[in-house]
Amino acid sequence: MESILVHPENAEQLKTVKAVLKALKVQFEPQPKTFPPHVLEGIERGLQQSRNGQTISLEEFKEKHFTKR
């Protein structure tokens, strides 16, 4: 038998889908949303930089990344 992957758009849809599956006695496995390890590492690195005071203003960022050289 094939499997399906469902993408509810909000909590109400998720609750309804789960209720229908339970009522039909269809087995399902909730899967938490997870990010790939490299994304989580990048987030943690950015948070650590912020805690260490290694920040720049939005204007400095724009100047560094968006000005033509």
Image (cartoon, rainbow, N blue to C red):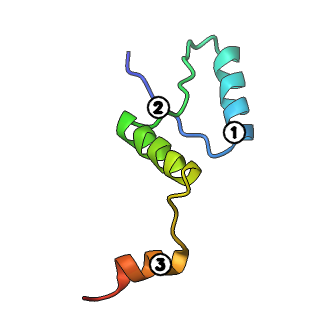
Check disc 3 and report the residue beneath it: 60
Residue found at the far bottom of this picture: 68
- Amino acid bearing label 2: Leu
Where residue 57 appears, x then y in whole percent? 54, 73
Check disc 2 and report the residue beneath it: 5
Question: Which mark's residue is nearer the viewer, 3 or 1?
Answer: 3
Where residue 55 appears, x then y in whole percent? 52, 63
Give the quadrant of residue 38.
top left
- Amino acid bearing label 1: Gln
Residue drawn at x 72%, y 23% as measured from the top left: 19
Residue at disc 2, secondary structure: loop
Which quadrant, please, contains the N terminus? top left
Which numbered marker is on residue 13? 1
Residue drawn at x 45%, y 45% as measured from the top left: 45
In the rendered view, would you say 29 is above or below 16? above
Which of the two discs, 3 and 1, labels the residue nearer the N terminus? Answer: 1
Mark 1 burial class by Cα count in 10 Å: few <14, some 14-19, many 20+: few
Where residue 17 appears, x then y in whole percent? 66, 30
Mark 2 burial class by Cα count in 10 Å: few <14, some 14-19, many 20+: few
Residue at disc 3, secondary structure: helix
- Horizontal side of 69 relative to 10 (left or right) equals left
Count of numbered circles in the view: 3
In the rendered view, would you say 62 is above or below 9? below
Residue drawn at x 67%, y 34% as measured from the top left: 14
Q: CA distance from mark 3 to mark 1?
A: 43 Å
Front-most of residues 5 and 26: 5
Which quadrant, please, contains the C terminus? bottom left
- Amino acid bearing label 3: Glu
